[in-house]
Amino acid sequence: MRPILLKGHERSITVVKYNYDGDLLFTASKDHVPSVWRAESGDRLGTFAGHKGTIWDLDVDRFSTRVLTASADASARLWDAETGECIKVFSHRGPVRGVAWADGSNSFATISDPFVDHNAQISIYDVPQDESPSDYDDTPRLEIDLPKTNDGKRVNPTNIVWLNLNEALFVTFDNGSIRLYDTVTGDELEEIFPHEKKINRVSFNQEKTLFITSSADFTAKLYDVVNLHHLKTYKTERPVNDAVIHPTKDHILLGGGQEAMSVTTTRGDVGKFETRFFHLVYEEEFGKVKGHFGPINALGVNPNGRSYASGAEDGYVRLHFFDKSYLDMKDPVPEAPEGGEEEEGGENYEEKQEDSDSDGQ
């Protein structure tokens, strides 16, 4: 596997994300300046300068014309992807933890942390492409307040995604829960508890029919989007910071490692700072890719399935291109009996084949 080391950030990487076409890679870190790279070569094309705090999340629209960023400086910003110019600043009451485009790229949603007396919030803004940015409203079209739980604890959102056709907002929380909200009324539609600890990241497949959660409870879990049924669990020995579904293979990529506070006293081979590959169906780990010197915080797979990017606490983004042997690899599939049923005498298809081969020799 051929890696390219992208040295464009000065602090820990927080997010890596490919655009829809897979020709651009967007990255962000705690150094306040997101970057965009050419996905094939690793050449840096530009930066988006203006934030004064950690960039926790970013999202690029369907045609890679506009970029959204969420920052700890209590703002979300809308950028021109080609020029790097800041189009609009949307101020919030607390640090902005996540941001996501709606289908059609005429609206977006943010999640913000609680600050002083203000609760955590979900905010929806309208930014029609056919209107001038000067006409965009500074105030959100809808605000969903996230009050304390009955026992007085704050529950903070960690990720936000629009479901297909903008039917609902999908939000993960630091208590291990997932909630769905109505995008018009703001009503809570459903709540499930996939994890016992914080959900660090959530990732969907291209069709948004499956999603995988990454948690501090050392597991990643695969769910069906339609009915929120739990399908598979992938277990590790360290917190899972990100997990992604491979677009062309039945594989899961997991990243994480020992807690960042312990990195300085931990060797790379002990801290589990590698990307781990699991079979989506069988839940079995079959490979690892090493290279980082700190916990992996973010993963992204190119939509063409030929490469992936990982960003870590060490401040580096590693762009990996899969070998031909991996791309041509066929996953082992249990042999099914001929005709779907066992043959006479309990012999299955494989055993009968071996018998017939020996008879013919």
Image (cartoon, rainbow, N blue to C red):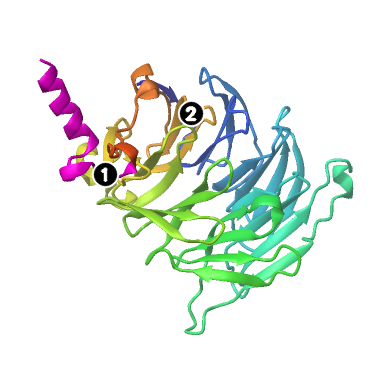
**Residue underneath mark 2:** 305
Which stretch did the figure color magenta?
A: 340-361
Does 110 sit above or below residue 268? below
Which residue is pictured at 43% across the width and 33% down the height? Answer: 249
Quadrant (top left/top right/bottom left/bottom right) for the N terminus: top left
Quadrant (top left/top right/bottom left/bottom right) for the C terminus: top left
Which residue occupies the foreground of this view, 311 or 106? Answer: 106
Q: Secondary structure at mark 1?
A: helix
- Tell me where residue 136 appears, x and y as whole percent: 85, 50
Marks 1 and 2 sit apart, C-alpha to C-alpha, by 34 Å
Residue 91 relative to residue 111: left or right: right
Residue 314 relative to residue 302: left or right: left
Camera-side mark, 1 or 2: 2
Which residue is pictured at 80% across the width and 56% down the height? Answer: 138
Which residue is pictured at 51% across the width and 21% down the height? Answer: 42
Residue 159: quadrant of the picture: bottom right
Which residue occupies the foreground of this view, 137 or 331? Answer: 331
Q: Is residue 144 magenta?
A: no
Which residue occupies the foreground of this view, 266 or 184? Answer: 184
Overall secondary structure of the magenta section: helix
Question: CB under 8 Å between callouts 1 and 2?
Answer: no
Which residue occupies the foreground of this view, 266 or 224? Answer: 224
| Residue type marked 2 | Gly
- Tell me where residue 91 appears, x and y as whole percent: 71, 56
- Tell me where residue 235 appears, x and y as whole percent: 29, 52
Residue 76 relative to residue 361: left or right: right
Residue 275: in sight, yes or no?
A: no
Residue 184: in sight, yes or no?
A: yes
| Residue type marked 1 | Thr
Label 2 neighbourhood size at 10 Å, few (<14), some (14-19), many (20+)? Answer: some
Disc nearer the start of the sequence (1/2): 1
**Residue underneath mark 1:** 264
